[in-house]
Image (cartoon, rainbow, N blue to C red):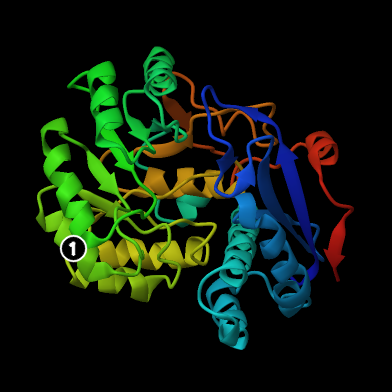
Amino acid sequence: MKIVALETILLKIPFGASGGPAAIAGAPASGLSILLVRVATDSGLVGWGEAFGHGVAPATKLALDTLVAPLFIGRDPTNIAALMREAQHTLHLYGRNGPVMYAFSGIDIALWDIAGKRAGLPLHQLLGGAQRTEIPAYASLTRHGEEAALLADCRRALALGYRMVKVHEVDPALVAAARAAVGPEIPLMMDTNCPWTPDEARAVVRILRPLDLYWLEEPVWPPEDHRGIAAVRAAGVPLAAGENACGGLQDFRRLFEAGALDFAQPSVTKIGGVTEVRKIIALAEAFGVRVVPHCAYFGPGYLASVHIAATLPGTVPLERLFMDLQTSPFSPYTDAAGGKVAVPQSPGLGCDPSPELIERYRTHPPTVTR
């Protein structure tokens, strides 16, 4: 089997987010950018992947079209690990983080989709088997910056059946208001997106301790300051991080060795795809750290995250951005019914996108590498 074509497809889908922000990860709130990767083979099998994404999607698409995609044409898609290592080594001078690595991630996910379809098995079976058929989702709220909209979303999430809530606030007073709104029994997470020095973060932790956070996420700038993150954890709060550890296995090794994490959050669309996440899961187990995949997307990266989470021991909650997309090309698997997400059971990722929706929300003419 050989890869005969690789297509990048950038979608922009309008969404609603009550009291939402002016932007989502650098992209205008008028639409959510989803970068799809379609890998076609001479056998007729097609795999779908997703490369991060959001505001950086145009740069990732350019990296895919001009640098990364040509390396895969004519290659055997079944030899995933060797193929990804060779391609990454070829382009390592472009950096081990950012759009080039995001591009590799999208292709890797598509290759695993092909592998599952070729075997007639869902991805979770290739990864060792699912431990459950549905996964609890947590409502990952947008950053509001003011109390009324934040509390409205907290209450709406509970009414929709979510039993875990994550806020993206940096003001402890707003987080305290959210805790009062959801009550003491609902796990509450706080994602700050790297705003503070370690000393500033430790000062905030002293205020946060009475709120009984399930985790504090990415409190330190820069995110590569692993010792600083560890110092914040030592101040007495469970720590989560990893979506920006795009150096992959070695970044997570340094985080684990520093004692920085209670929860490791590899992002499958950023870190090198399913292949790299598998390595991180094994390393996390050796260090006794729980893996909870970062999942701020709605395409094949979301589906891959569902399959990965389904194979992990214990109850692993899945992040679900708390926004109402006008439509989803991968529905119903990107929906959270009653605060739970179904694990796909069809071969590969378990769901191909709707061609009609792709044509409706595509932002560019087809870009195909052959």
Taking the image as drawn, is residue 19 in sight?
A: yes
- How far from the left and from the top, in percent, is residue 343? 48, 36
Foreground pick, 345 / 297:
297
x then y, percent, for residue 337: 48, 21
Look at 67% across and 70% down and name the residue there: 77
Q: Is residue 255 above or below residue 326?
A: below
**Residue at 17% of width from left, 38% of height from top?**
208
Quadrant showing the N terminus: bottom right
* Image coordinates for residue 127, horizontal then vertical, percent: 44, 56
* Foreground pick, 111 / 185: 185
Q: Is residue 290 left or right of residue 71?
A: left
Q: Find numbered disc 1 in the image and state the secondary structure of the residue it sits on.
A: helix
Residue hosting label 1: 230
Compare residues 319 and 351 and report the one nearer the observer: 319
In this view of the protein, which residue sits in the foreground, 13 or 20? 20
The x and y percentages for residue 259 are: 16, 65
Q: Which quadrant is the C terminus positioned in? A: bottom right
On screen, 121 above or below 332?
below
Where residue 165 sits, quadrant-wise, is top left
| 149 versus 86 height, above or below | above
Quadrant assignment, res 226: bottom left
Q: Is residue 1 left or right of residue 226?
A: right
Residue 103 to residue 57: above or below:
below
Residue 355: image quadrant is top right
Report the side of 185 relative to 136 (left or right).
left
Residue at image point 52% right, 51% down: 123
